[in-house]
Amino acid sequence: MSRRRGVMSEQFKAEIAKDLGIYEKVQREGWGGITTKDAGNMVKRAIQIAEQAAAKGTQQ
């Protein structure tokens, strides 16, 4: 069975989890311990960061 490769780096996921206040839960329980809602919020935040980076890139 092939293992699916993650899109976000562990460092980036940790940064977003810290921003959202769920990093302590991740440290205690691992990524499998977060709720679906938390995971969705992480994706939303990652998209916001990517959009901001793209906007900065087009302004230069």
Image (spheres, grey):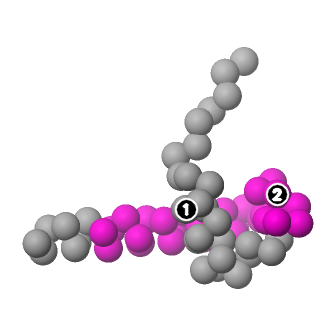
Q: Residue at x 52, y 46 (%)?
A: 7
Q: Is residue 27 visible?
A: yes
- The N terminus sits in image quarter: top right
Q: Residue at x 30, y 69 (%)?
A: 53
**Residue with the mark numbered 2:** 30
Q: Secondary structure at mark 1?
A: helix
Q: CA distance from mark 1 to mark 2?
A: 15 Å
Choose top left, top right, bottom left or bottom right for residue 48.
bottom left
What residue range appears in magenta? 26-53
Q: Residue at x 11, y 72 (%)?
A: 60
Choose top left, top right, bottom left or bottom right for residue 10.
bottom right
Crowding near the residue tagged with mark 1, few <14, some 14–19, many ≥20 C-alpha atoms within 10 Å = few
Residue 39 in the image: x percent, y percent? 66, 63
Q: Is residue 40 visible?
A: no
Q: Secondary structure at mark 2?
A: loop
**Residue with the mark numbered 1:** 12
Q: How many marks?
A: 2
